[in-house]
Amino acid sequence: MKTEQSPALDGQIARAFIAHARALLTEDYLLRIVRCLATLDETDVWWRANAESNSIGNLLLHLAGNARQWIVSGVGGVPDVRVRDSEFTATDKEGLTKAELLARLHATLKEVDSVLARLDTATLLDTRTIQNCTGVTVLEAVFHVVEHFSMHTGQIILLTKLRTARDLALYDFTDGIPRKTWE
């Protein structure tokens, strides 16, 4: 049975969705990545398990490229200048340090957050062409970036644990309740 919702409730849900997406990107995933990078040296950031795998450096470039393409360009209308393949072929030979990679990711997420902060939630069902895919709704674009960021943040955490052989203590379980420690 379908129930009708008021436009006010629809707007409230849309605003809550955007607010949560912004928080996940800037206050959750990014801060976990920062925690990981604090434990790694430059060699660890560019280490690859094998030729078919990506380094953390590649993943950071990829996250910045993807978020910029889908939100800043796709939703915000800024020209798309992404060269996706370069995100995966980059190595330590290009001279990008973990500080520079993190600065790039921070700058991109600042742009993303700016687009989302001024987004008219009435446009969530408007369509865009993003990455040569037509008919992508703004809602799908935002959801894609959050989901994509989550997946690669998990990979960065795993790679960090593999390189450091230690628990990152992302949660405190002292009283039996998981509490974030990266805030």
Image (cartoon, rainbow, N blue to C red):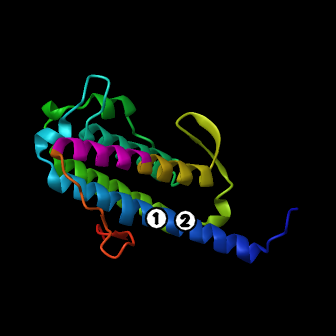
Q: Does the magenta segment cover residue 15? A: no
Mark 2: which amino acid? Ile
Above or below: residue 50 compared with residue 139: above
Q: In the image shown, does 160 or 30 lie closer to the viewer?
A: 160
- On screen, residue 54 versus residue 116, left or right, reads left
Judge whether 5 appears above or below 150 on screen: below
Left or right: residue 46 compared with residue 175: left
Q: Which residues are magenta?
A: 151-163
Q: Which residue is mark 2?
A: 18
What secondary structure do most residues of the magenta stretch adopt?
helix
Residue furthest to the right in view is 1
Q: Is residue 104 above or below residue 65?
A: below
Please name the residue that numbered disc 1 is placed on: 22
Residue 157 within the magenta-colored segment of the rendering: yes
Q: Is residue 138 visible?
A: yes
Residue 109 image point, x, y percent: 37, 57
| Quarter containing the C terminus | bottom left
Q: Secondary structure at mark 2?
A: helix
- Residue 56 lies in quadrant: top left
Q: Name the residue: 31% across, 29% down.
A: 53
Amino acid residing under circle 1: Arg
Question: In which quadrant of the rendered image does the N terminus lie?
Answer: bottom right
Residue ID at (19%, 37%): 46
